[in-house]
Amino acid sequence: MTRVLITGASAGLGAEYARQLAARGDDLVLVARDGGRLEALAGDLHGVEVEVLPADLLDPEQIARVEERLRDPEKPVDMLINNAGYGMGLAFERNDVEDEVKHLRLHNEVPLRLSHAALPGMLARGHGRIVNIASVAAFTPRSTYGACKRWLVDISRWMSGEYGTRGVTATAVCPGYTHTEFHARLGLPPGQEGIPGWMWLDAPDVIAESLRDIDRGKALSVPSRRYKAIVALLKVVPAGVAARASARGR
Ligand code: NAP
């Protein structure tokens, strides 16, 4: 039996991880700010134990409760999915600097704190999985969002090498544009994101493919053939060309 703690489980990719992991029999701990949505999701998941742990991960006292839950030896967490996140306007110089700092903290400080809380127990038990939801934006010069996601790719690669031989794997999952609430929360309603139709993925496909990679202990998961090809291309095109191409769409 596996118990998985998912951050950002109230919507989008996090909720889809919850559905697919519950379908294969894993117990869950669901974390997000909206406790009502987490309760509603928990009510739809049958045959597994689901704990609802509402928390704003940017609030020091609330994230401390999640860290405490990850350290609990009585009900060990075998897999941590650092998924909570959101986007910022691409014009860094026009964004409020405090908003930028919150964005940085949610994407980097929060996964660092939660991984740090989860790792000692995982290493003592000799097994565990840390999953960081990054993005294909990690491979493009794309404002602070891409830079935060790159950090998640790099730390996952390092953790994978550092802890893999002791039974704990780390995987950076790098989805491309995926239908969730992400773009609506940026103020871009469906159809107005400026992104061509062929570039959109569906959350169930992204999660199913990423779970296969996580199960294999891969350090990097780029769901879908089309985004694998895009990432391969981004590694060889000049940085200026990649920057111009990635400035399109949100
Ligand atoms: P989403 O549908 O908007 O879901 C975001 C989740 O994060 C929600 O459950 C939200 O829940 C939670 N969250 C936000 N701020 C939080 C906070 N302060 N504390 C706790 N939870 C918080 O977006 P999504 O697309 O599923 O995004 C999930 C991850 O995938 C993000 O890291 C995103 O960067 C990444 N990603 C998305 C795409 C895409 O195109 N959709 C592509 C690549 C990567 P509450 O509002 O209830 O707190």
Image (tube, rainbow, N blue to C red):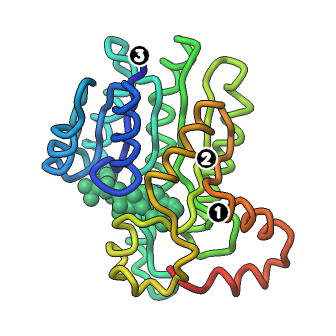
Precedes in sequence: disc 1 or disc 3? 3
Q: Which residue is mark 2?
A: 172
Dot 2 or dot 1: first in sequence order is 1
Label 1 near label 2: C-beta < 8 Å?
Answer: yes
Tell me which amino acid carries mark 2: Ala
Answer above or below: position of 15 versus 165. below
122 in relation to 241, above or below:
above
Which of these two is toward me, 154 or 49? Answer: 49
The numbered mark at residue 1 is: 3
User: Where is residue 138 shown, x and y percent of the image?
Assistant: 64, 63
Disc 2 element: strand
**Sequence order check: which comes first, mark 3 or mark 2?**
3
- Whole-percent x, y for residue 163 in the image: 67, 26
Which amino acid does the dot numbered 3 rest on? Met
Q: Considering the numbered disc 1 on the image, is that residue within a helix, a strand or a loop?
A: helix
Q: Nearer the viewer, residue 31 or 197?
A: 197
Name the quarter where the N terminus is drawn. Answer: top left
> Residue 138, which numbered label?
1
Q: Residues within 10 Å of mark 1 (few under 14, many from 20)?
A: many
In the rendered image, residue 17, in percent from the top left (x then y), is placed at 40, 43
The quadrant in which residue 142 appears is bottom right
Q: Is residue 73 above or below residue 45?
A: above
Residue at 46% x, 40% y is 81
Q: Is residue 105 visible?
A: no
Residue 155 visible in the picture: yes
Per the model, the C-alpha gap separating discs 3 and 2 is 23 Å
Q: Callout 3: helix, strand or loop?
A: loop
Q: Is residue 107 left or right of residue 5?
A: right
